[in-house]
Amino acid sequence: MGAGHELLVIGMNHRTSPVTLRERLAVEGPGLAEEVRRLHDDADLPEVVLLSTCNRVEVYVGGEDRERTAQAVASWLERRAGEPVGDFLYVHHGDEAVRHTFRVASSLDSLVVGEPQILGQVKEAYAAARSGAAVGTLLDRCFTTAFAVAKRVRSETEIAAGSVSVSSIAGDLATKIFGDLEGRRVLLVGAGEMGEQAAKHLRKSGATLYVLNRSPEKAEALAADVGGHARGLEELGSELAQADVAIASTSSPRFVITPELMKGVIKARRHKPIFLIDIAVPRDVDPRVGDMDNVFLYDVDDLEQVAAENLTARRREAERAEQIVGHEVVAFEKWRRSGALKPTIVGLRKRVRGVLQAELERTLPRLGDLGDKERRSLDKMVDAMTNKLLHRAVSELKAGADTPDGEALVRTVRRLFDLEEPSAPAERRAGDEAVMKKLQPAAGRGKAS
Amino acid sequence: MLVTVLFALTVVAYAASAGLYVLFLARGTEGGATWAARVLGGAVACHVGFLVGNWVIGGHLPTDDIHQALAVMSLLVVLLFLIAARSRKRLQVLGAFITPVTLLLFLGAAFRRGVGPVPEGVRSALLPVHVGVNILGLAAFALAFAAAVAYVIQERQLRQKKLGGLMQRLPALDVLDSLGLRWVLIGFPLLTVGVVTGTIWAVRLNPHSFGLSAAQGFGLLAWLLFALVLLLRVAAGWRGRKAAIGTMLGFLCTVLVLVGYLLRGVGGIG
């Protein structure tokens, strides 16, 4: 791994690009390995991981040449999109790219912070790239560290605690009232989208669904859709008497469940607790019902309030997670820099000694016959000259091992003593500004850095 | 001396365990319940040592006086709790309510203002039966009480729509409700036998007095409360918060009976 070998992330996420564009760019399942191969071989990128989810399309590259890499990835994206994508792209490099990788894997960059799917998706992306032999030392280390960071974040912070969607909060609450939901009766009144989702969520936990609707056809259709039994609206009272959870999401302008109705229901159900979820706007359940004994009433505002609180709590935890990520980035960069240092010192010695040795060899014939003893003395002299010449340089390099200055010094030394790989273009550190100018036409979105 | 040391150790361990359980309930500290349970295990060991020491050294049988009875009962409460929490991990958190009750009962065992052992003249064959069933019954009620307190708190959280960690750590309402019912069902027949034997004994001691002492009065009140809770539960399908509050009041009455004994001594009840 050369001194200039660093991580680059080029891509777009839910904040920088519209979903219509990401849809076209998305690479799924078996296509992943194929596209990684295309980037690796055809675009000639040394190390590539391709991450494609519904919220992000990102290419992770380990390489030397920032500008060429960014252009190769951008043109790959543009070919797939069939339009310029520069407006929507961000480019991260060096420790910012490493930080980005860790944040993505830890679900800190997700639309819903702390959501659990992203880690699996990153792992899949990594596995696909590995199977295509597109992963080298840098990406390997970077991604395996990212998985460990994600695990740390998950266990050391409460970033994934508390549900943040209305339907899963409804499920949590039902569990807190009834314990096990296996075999419980859930009544769905009306055909609202959110109500349907909540009902499906409860069914997954083992509850049986009953669907009530004004029109029998609609009830049948909905029951088939959510996997429940259809009932007519006239059975509301008797169904409420048997249900454990009732989700109301009708479009009725008046209260459907009134205190008068519930009084009879509570009697009929012998005070068994009931959980009423009112997702309708305007509301279906008279709020006075919520004051009755053994009735637990939550309306859509309550559920959204809980969701907002949980999200706030997650954000607070996210700040702690960012600190963990920060420490891990520093540790990773330390590893990476030390990786570049050793070959530089070895290369430097080799180069200087080589020059001295070559000059010595050229002069030797003119010195006449020399014995073995004299030859050995001359060899020793070359060694001593090399050490003395490089003493200061080597100790400076070592002293700066973990700092950005040290990294700059390594690059300078490599350039001064011509230690770069011969293929590397001389002006390659022309700067990110140049890269970004090419990727981002006039209306730059200012997202990338 | 040894017995005193064991007593002190038991008190300290119960207090520490109670603190850990409450901390776990309030904050959800990682592994908090496990540590609380370990300390509680230590407390139980000291407690058993204390009882055996009292028995061997002091020659007191558990049914001899109110202090011994309390010491045995508090141990029983913990043992019942540990058994229940072993099969259902979610009940561990109830330790936050059980351990303080246990600690208070155990401290009651050392409260020496009342008279010592039951005087010879008052003893009868009924005494061990009376004390034994009451010990068992009250231990069951102590657990029902803990479940009821947890129920009332959990119900409040749900009604006030506070879905914080406290709500997450407490068991589900339905679980607490049926737990409360089960323990009251176990405790009630025992208490019934306890009240009947107690009354027979009191009447025998003092056949001409028909007045009720305070302790007897509270005993009867507790019995009535539990009878009412059970009757309403079974007949009217009563449950939830009202049943929980009834259970709590019933247990508090039984505790008042104990306080009466502790303050006035068994000899004073006639």
Image (cartoon, rainbow, N blue to C red):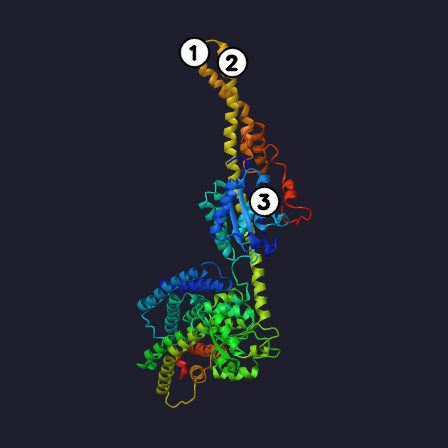
Q: Give how far apart the Cα atoms at labels 3 and 1 are.
A: 64 Å
Residue that protrudes farthest toward the right in the picture: A442
Q: Nearer the viewer, residue A148 or A105?
A: A105
On screen, residue A158 above or below B100: above
Q: Which residue is mark 3?
A: A75
Query: Residue drawn 53% across and 21% down?
Result: A355
Chain letter for mark 3: A
Residue A255: percent from left, percent from top: 59, 79
| Mark toward the viewer: 3 or 1 | 3
- Which numbered disc flags the more N-terminal residue, 2 or 1? 2
Q: Amino acid at mark 2?
A: Thr
Asked which secondary structure carries label 1, the reply is loop
How packed is label 3: few (under 14 Cα within 10 Å), some, or many (20 or more)? some
On screen, residue B17 above or below B151: above
Q: Which residue is mark 2?
A: A363
- Which numbered disc flags the more N-terminal residue, 3 or 2? 3
Chain letter for mark 1: A
Q: Quadrant of residue B41?
A: bottom left
Residue A358: percent from left, percent from top: 51, 19
